[in-house]
Image (tube, rainbow, N blue to C red):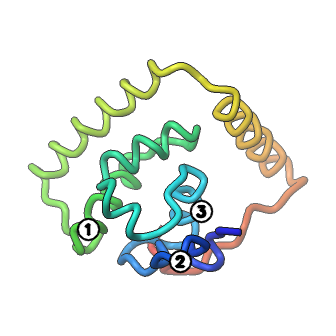
Amino acid sequence: MTSARDGGTGTGGTPLTDIRNIGPATAEGLIKAGIPDAETLRALGGHEAYRRWLGAGLAPHFIGYYVLVMALQGRPWNDCGPKEKAELRRAFDALKAEVKQAPLTPDRAKEKDRLHWEAILDEIGLITPPKRRAGAGD
C-alpha cells in the first residue's frame, strides 16, 4: 500500500518526498488526494494538485499551497517574493472558492468527519497526533 512512510511509493514511481520541501505529512495528504508519486505530481502541477488536495477534503492552507508551487519549481519554500506571493494568494483564494462550491461527495464528507473527530480527540488528549521530524519541510 502507498504510504507517506515509504515516501509515497507503491506505483513504481519516485517517492513524493524526493521533491524538495515535500515532507511526510505533505506526502500523506497528496496520497489521500490521489497523487501517489512525484511523476504524477509534476504532471499535474501545483495548482491542480492542490485542487485535488482540497477536493479530498483536506484543510486549505496558503503556505502549503505556495510551498508546493515552489517545490515543483525546485525553489526553496521561502524564495517567494512579495509580488509573486500576492499573485499566488489570488490564485489560492480563487481555487478555495471554486472547490468550496463543488458538491460534497460521500467520500469527502466521510474524510472531513474523520479529520474533525481526530482534531477533537487530540484536543482533549484522547489521541496523540503523528510525530513530525524537525525540519521535514512541512
The local secondary structure at tag 2 comes to loop
Report x, y in % for residue 54: 49, 39
Q: CA distance from mark 3 to mark 1?
A: 22 Å
- Residue linked to disc 2: 12
Side of 101 where 121 appears, left or right: right
Of circles 3 and 2, which is in front? 2
Give above or below for 39 relative to 48.
Answer: below
Front position in the image: 96 or 124: 96
What's the residue type where badge 3 is placed?
Answer: Glu
What's the residue type where badge 1 is placed?
Answer: Asn
Badge 3 or badge 2: first in the primary sequence: 2
The quadrant of the picture occupied by the N terminus is: bottom right
Q: CA distance from mark 1 to mark 2?
A: 31 Å
In the picture as drawn, the residue positioned furthest to the left comes out as 83
What's the residue type where badge 2 is placed?
Answer: Gly
Q: Residue at x 54, y 52 (%)?
A: 34
The local secondary structure at tag 1 comes to loop
Report x, y in % for residue 81: 13, 59
**Quarter where residue 64 is shown:** bottom left
Q: Residue at x 65, y 69 (%)?
A: 3
Q: CA distance from mark 3 to mark 2?
A: 17 Å
Residue 78 - label: 1
Residue 28 - label: 3
